Structures are given as C-alpha cells and as structure tokens.
Amino acid sequence: MNSYPKDEHALATYPKTELYSCCEGNRAPDWSEYEYLVLEGCTTIPLDPGTTSEKGSNEILGLQDRKAADFFTVYAWKDGCRAITDVGDFNKATRLIKHLSEISGLEYQINC
C-alpha cells in the first residue's frame, strides 16, 4: 500500500464530477466506512444484442492490465468495494487516486 505524501497534488483542485463520478450526486462517500483505495483497469464488454443488465447493454470487467483497459476505476474497499470514480487515462487516474488518498486519509494501491 502507498500512503500519499503531501505535495503539489494535494494543492490541486478537481471538480466533484471528476472525483466522485460513480457516487450519487457526485458527493464524497463516508470515508470512515472504508479501509483503503484501489485503482483497477476496466474494460467494457457488449452484451449479446437484445439483452440488457441492470447497468444497460454492456458489462464492465475489472482487473484488467493497464494496456488492455478501456478506462480506470478508483474503488474504496472494506469487505467489498464501492466505485468512486472512472477515469479514461491511467496517468490522470494515478493523480486522482493520490488526491483522493490525501482527502480521505486512506492508503491506496494500484492494481494495473
């Protein structure tokens, strides 16, 4: 796990729509409910034509290698996960997880 030393990323300002794109109302979760943050590579897999899931006509597959990923998701973990934000670029995703680590006080790991 990595802890985030205070530096220029701590001074960065990100809109809530970037920090919490997977959270209801783009609001921060209660960080006390989680133990750490994880960055995962994800890809989108279309479902068979005419079928849908609760999330629409695509399924999201996590645990993807950085090169195979279509996008990256920051999750908060404690006995399961909660998606916090989705980011299209790996470098931006690493900056965001570091920033979220600073905001939340949670350590993080990068799994892609």
Image (cartoon, rainbow, N blue to C red):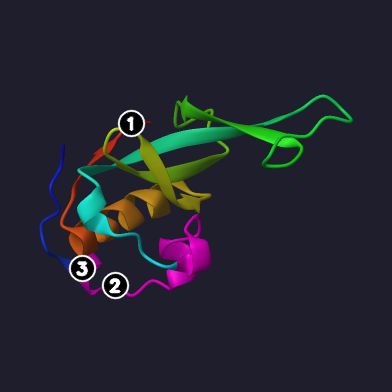
**Of callouts 1 and 3, which one flags the residue occurring earlier in the amino acid sequence?**
3
Q: Is residue 106 above or below residue 52?
A: below
Q: Which residues are magenta?
A: 8-26
Residue at (73% x, 41% y) in the render: 56
Residue 48 counted in the magenta span: no
Q: Which quadrant, please, contains the C terminus?
A: top left
Question: Which of 7/109 is in front?
Answer: 109
Please state the horizontal and vertical placement of residue 43, each as a whole percent of the image.
Answer: 58, 33
Q: Amino acid at mark 3?
A: Ala
Give the CA distance from mark 1 to mark 2.
24 Å
| Element carrying mark 3 | helix
Q: Circle 3 is placed at which residue position?
A: 10
Q: Amino acid at mark 2?
A: Ala
| Element carrying mark 2 | loop
Residue 11 counted in the magenta span: yes
Q: Which of the 4 image quarters holds residue 61?
A: top right
Give the CA distance from mark 1 to mark 3.
22 Å
Question: Which of 45/92 is in front?
Answer: 45
Please state the horizontal and vertical placement of residue 98, each as a whole percent of the image.
Answer: 25, 54
Give the CA distance from mark 3 to mark 2.
6 Å
Please state the horizontal and vertical placement of residue 66, each as a whole percent of the image.
Answer: 45, 32
Q: Is residue 109 left or right of residue 42?
A: left
For the residue carrying disc 1, how many other residues have a C-alpha within 10 Å: few (<14), some (14-19), or many (20+)?
A: few
Residue 111 numbered mark, or none = 1
Q: Is residue 67 left or right of residue 93?
A: right
| Element carrying mark 1 | loop
Q: Circle 2 is placed at which residue position?
A: 12
